[in-house]
Image (tube, helix red, strand yellow):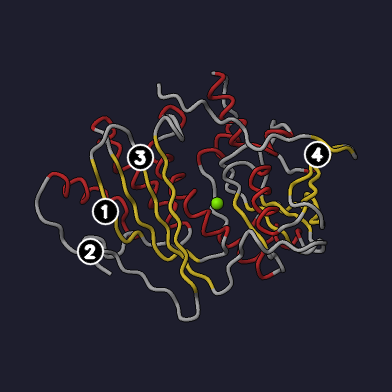
Amino acid sequence: MSHIPLGPGGEFDAVRAIIAQLGASAHGVGDDAGAFTVPPGEVGFVSTDVAVEDVHFRRAWFTAEEIGYRSAAAALSDLAAMAATPRAVVIALTLPERWRADAPAIAAGIAGAAQSVGAPVVGGDLSDGPTLAIAITVIGSTRAPLTRGGAKVGQGIWVTGRLGGPAVALAAHQGGSAVPPRAQKRFARPTPRIREAFWLAAHGATACIDISDGLSGDLGHIAAASSVRLVVQRDGLPRVEGASAEQAASGGEEYELAVTAPQSLDAAAFTREFNVPLTCIGEVRAGEAGVEWHSAGASVAVPQAFDHFDHAPQ
Ligand SMILES: [Mg+2]
């Protein structure tokens, strides 16, 4: 689908520059509303995510391209958590004067994330404002959604990837120490696990959440929605090099998936397919809804979520 030409004006010049950066990922941008289609028999899902400078990230931590990329990846990760195919992305950008020159790089980052999962950017809005804010709305569809409420007693609790990278990178940024490159990569370039979610659904997963606020807190949502007790082995969490068990358990912005699925799941087959680890970290049990963490056979307390940063504007 080609774009509808925009009329003259400074704002539209900026929009034209952004559309140029979106390249092949933009579809039919420029009319009053964007179009998308949902295949017959599928249900549509919509989710939105906003990233605000000095609330969700600091400029010094990322390139402009990374800021765009991870904003879109975070939103798309919510579609992965539903096992939904991305169908459309809509961008709302509040752009202060001091960020104006970075707009094309931010757009290129958003386009990169959208293209990585085959999602077209179908529209957006651009506004002046005091703070950079990137709001990404994603639309997806699926025949059989994975929800938080589907966990069944006797299943295993499984997690994709290795955890703790974003927490390690964040601690280094805040402490002024050298940031380990692998941790920074996990922080700056999370992968929305769309294809992985479909594999997990096809192999018996019945509940899913993406880890945005930290595994500990996010598992609490599955436990509450499914009315089950999740017993998790803290020391068995897959971790990036240098991450503590606590960082893996509580660090946010992972965008890995936590699912409940049969304990007999073939993790080696998953890893062969995606080159990503899949680890059983615990078991779904009957009992009072909640998450119980174990370490060396004893019950341990794990914080709900890492205190990311103080959110005070600089
Ligand atoms: Mg989510």
Q: Position of residue 122 (x, y in %)?
A: 32, 61
- Report how far apart the C-alphas of labels 2 and 1 lie in the structure: 9 Å
- Report how far apart the C-alphas of labels 2 and 3 lie in the structure: 25 Å
Query: Would residue 203 be seen by someone viewing this image from the given angle?
Result: yes
Residue to which mark 2 is pinned: 3
- Report how far apart the C-alphas of labels 4 and 2 lie in the structure: 52 Å
Residue to which mark 3 is pinned: 133
Q: Position of residue 123 (x, y in %)?
A: 29, 58
In the picture, the disc for residue 153 is none
Residue at the extreme top: 176
- Report how far apart the C-alphas of labels 4 and 1 lie in the structure: 47 Å
Label 4 vs 2, first from the N-terminus: 2
Q: Does the residue labelled 1 lie within 8 Å of ligand 1?
A: no
Total marks in image: 4
Are the residues flagged by discs 2 and 1 in contact, CB closer than 8 Å?
yes
Please, what secondary structure does the residue beneath circle 4 have?
Answer: helix
- Viewport quadrant of the N terminus: bottom left
Disc 3 residue type (three-letter): Ala
